[in-house]
Image (spheres, rainbow, N blue to C red):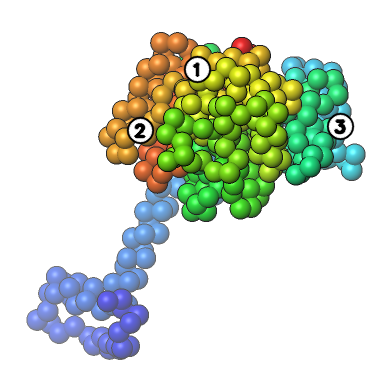
């Protein structure tokens, strides 16, 4: 119990009797709470003064290095650097000659920075934690019968390029991951958006309520987005992906009509991924109509591995493995390590998973350390090739 919670005690010290020695006087003195507190304060202040004498002024903080921006500019900056800083701020951005506080333990040449800076030709520098541009981007949509549909813009700019997360390779093996099934369960969807690093691509169910809001939130958190296209599985109709399932034996125009309804549900996705589809992807006619429609709208197609042999003349990537076929911590961890091994062998690897609670937890833990093992976490769009 603190001395301040006790009742106030007042001790009156009388003159010591001749029979009391110095040791007894000291013991009685420190027994007084006020004398003890004063002594503690004295010892604390004495220690502080000694530390100041040895180490310098405690208010000075960490060592600082004063850098003159004018001198730096004279030595290294290219012409027009001041103008470039204010080019997008007609209100007049103020350039300050400030003091930069440098770390006492500077990072080595191979250290990873917390905020990667990515430069894309024709764009400003992009920081890893920056939000992606809000959708829709002007010139990349047209009004369809059910809503906005993606189109290729003037000059050939595609939604696959415009809505993808910017990426610059650092030369290390690239590891990507798509987490799907989002939009139906609010808790899992928010957990994926807010807890997973922005390099992880998120895939949304087209039947979700508030789909555009979820996609907007994902892009605000830096995630690029895919839209899921339900496709006919071999066990249909026992396993029915919904009323707008793309059917293997449907005529091409019917496939395109259903696909356009799916695409009109929201904007901001760079491509489409399959949901099921083991029968659909085995049909040449069905896949020709499907990939032709995506190609005409400038979209990418990322599949879970079931359509790895399919091309289509559009940006493509196929998952090398599904990381949560078995829903256990140990199995998911092993699949993620196998994904790393594939990236080491082939230069890149893409995984696919579902928004199960255990998957989200294990992926979040894995993503925190994967780059420390020599890999680069990459969005799925960075692993696509045109085929």
Q: Earlier in the sequence, mark 2 or mark 3?
A: 3
Q: Residues within 10 Å of mark 2 (few under 14, many from 20)?
A: few
**Mark 1, secondary structure of its residue:** loop
Determine the CA span between mark 3 and mark 1.
46 Å
- Tell me the quarter of the picture where residue 335 sits: top left
Of marks 3 and 1, the one in the foreground = 1
Residue 153: mark in rendering: none
Q: Are marks 2 and 3 in contact (CB under 8 Å)?
A: no
Q: Residues within 10 Å of mark 1 (few under 14, many from 20)?
A: some
Point out the image quarter for the C terminus. top right
Residue lying at 70% horizontally and 28% vertically, measured from the top left = 253
Horizontal side of 156 relative to 27 (left or right) equals: right
Q: Are marks 1 and 2 in contact (CB under 8 Å)?
A: no
Residue position for label 2: 325
Residue position for label 1: 308
Toward the left, the furthest residue is: 19
Residue 103 seen by the camera? no
Residue position for label 3: 87
The tally of labels here is: 3
Residue lying at 84% horizontally and 32% vertically, measured from the top left = 139
């Amino acid at each position: 119990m603190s001395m301040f919670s006790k009742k106030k005690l007042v001790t009156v010290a009388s003159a010591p009797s001749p029979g009391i020695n110095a040791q007894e006087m000291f013991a009685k003195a420190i027994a007084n709470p006020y004398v003890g507190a004063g002594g503690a304060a004295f010892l604390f202040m004495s220690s502080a003064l000694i530390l100041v004498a040895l180490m310098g002024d405690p208010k000075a903080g960490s060592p600082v290095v004063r850098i003159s921006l004018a001198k730096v500019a004279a030595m290294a900056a290219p012409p027009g650097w001041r103008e470039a800083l204010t080019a997008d701020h007609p209100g007049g951005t103020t350039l300050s000659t400030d003091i930069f506080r440098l770390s006492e333990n500077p990072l080595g040449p191979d250290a990873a920075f917390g905020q990667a800076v990515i430069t894309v030709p024709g764009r400003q520098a992009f920081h890893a934690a920056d939000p992606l541009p809000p959708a829709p981007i002007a010139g990349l949509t047209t009004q369809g019968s059910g809503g906005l549909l993606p189109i290729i813009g003037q000059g050939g700019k595609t939604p696959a390029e415009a809505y993808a997360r910017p990426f610059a390779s650092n030369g290390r093996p690239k590891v990507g991951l798509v987490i799907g099934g989002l939009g139906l369960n609010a808790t899992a969807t928010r957990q994926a958006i807010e807890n997973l690093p922005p390099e992880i691509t998120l895939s949304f169910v087209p039947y979700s309520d508030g789909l555009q809001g979820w996609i907007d939130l994902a892009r605000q958190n830096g995630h690029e987005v895919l839209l899921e296209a339900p496709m006919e599985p071999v066990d249909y109709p026992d396993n029915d992906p919904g009323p707008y399932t793309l059917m293997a034996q449907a005529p091409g125009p019917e496939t395109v009509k259903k696909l356009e309804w799916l695409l009109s549900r929201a904007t901001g996705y760079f491509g489409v991924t399959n949901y099921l589809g083991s029968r659909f992807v085995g049909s040449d006619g069905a896949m020709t109509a499907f990939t032709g429609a995506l190609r005409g709208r400038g979209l990418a197609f990322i599949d879970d591995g079931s359509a790895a042999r399919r091309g289509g003349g559009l940006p493509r990537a196929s998952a090398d493995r599904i990381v949560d076929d078995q829903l256990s911590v140990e199995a998911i961890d092993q699949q993620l390590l196998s994904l790393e091994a594939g990236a080491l062998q082939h230069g890149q690897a893409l995984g696919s998973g579902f928004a199960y609670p255990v998957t989200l937890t294990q992926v979040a833990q894995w993503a925190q350390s994967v780059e420390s093992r020599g890999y680069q976490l990459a969005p799925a769009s960075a692993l696509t090739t045109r085929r």
